[in-house]
Image (cartoon, coloured by chain):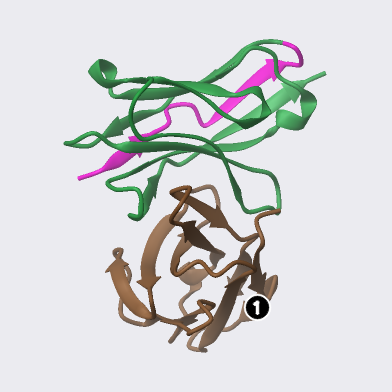
Amino acid sequence: AQSVTQPDIHITVSEGASLELRCNYSYGATPYLFWYVQSPGQGLQLLLKYFSGDTLVQGIKGFEAEFKRSQSSFNLRKPSVHWSDAAEYFCAVGARRDDKIIFGKGTRLHILP
Amino acid sequence: ETGVTQSPTHLIKTRGQQVTLRCSSQSGHNTVSWYQQALGQGPQFIFQYYREEENGRGNFPPRFSGLQFPNYSSELNVNALELDDSALYLCAFLTSGLNEQFFGPGTRLTVL
């Protein structure tokens, strides 16, 4: 069965510091992988997605993620965070491009001034 | 701005009641999915509609039902509401060209 694990419930970083949010997935075949961001009271916004090809994908707002098949991971990174990045981040996996998406439980990012 | 709208924004119901949530898109995307997001959790897939037919369902009981209309807007109906149904309900339209799901802002349902 598909599943997504985000081991960090909360992460706090200082503004300007680098960020890495961890995501591990369980799926038999090559998964379709996503990172979404959710600000308070808002819906989900897609940051980036991986379907195939280059394992390092670039997204919006300066985010990137790297697919590592050997580690079943799809970690999200940003070299320098801004206060506006404070939000909830969800990693997700799908079996096909138009399939249901299985979400992790999320990581809440806090930014220190 | 995703162009996906949901109504109402907030809703309070009591146990045993029925509720209808609505979702629409500015663009004519023919695939819509519904998700339930309980507090502190990630969204969970309820079901998907494609061209007015249910096209996949998650682990939700039959009292969760849906409709998709010819204009591709959609409804989620929940009968016999339970306290655990309190959650944010999200809909998402799939763009076939971009292979991306655009989510609406959600409807916050509280069951008392």
Which chain is painted in brown? B
Q: Is residue A12 left or right of residue A93?
A: right
Q: Residue at x 54, y 68 (%)?
A: B86
Q: Residue at x 65, y 78 (%)?
A: B12
Give the image quarter of residue A54: top left
- Does residue A8 appear in this view? yes
Residue B21 lies in magenta, yes or no?
A: no
Residue A9 lies in magenta, yes or no?
A: yes
- Does residue B111 appear in this view? no
Single out the residue that lies furthest toward the bottom: B17
Give x and y (percent) for residue A55: 38, 20
Single out the residue that lies furthest toward the front: B97
Give the image quarter of residue A60: top right
* Label 1: chain letter: B
Q: Is residue A2 left or right of residue B7?
A: left
> Which residue has dot 1 on it?
B12
Q: Is residue A16 left or right of residue A107?
A: right
Q: Residue at x 61, y 61 (%)?
A: B104
> Where A39 falls versus A69 (above or below)?
below
Type of amino acid at the residue the image marks with label 1: Ile
Q: Which residues are magenta?
A: A1-16
Image quarter (top left, top right, bottom left or bottom right) of the N terminus of chain A: top left
Give x and y (percent) for residue A110: 69, 27
The front one of A12 and A95 is A95
Q: Colour of chain A?
A: green
Single out the residue that lies furthest toward the right: A113
The front one of A73 and B70 is B70
Give x and y (percent) for residue B106: 61, 63
> Where A106 falls versus B35 (above or below)?
above
The front one of A58 and B17 is A58
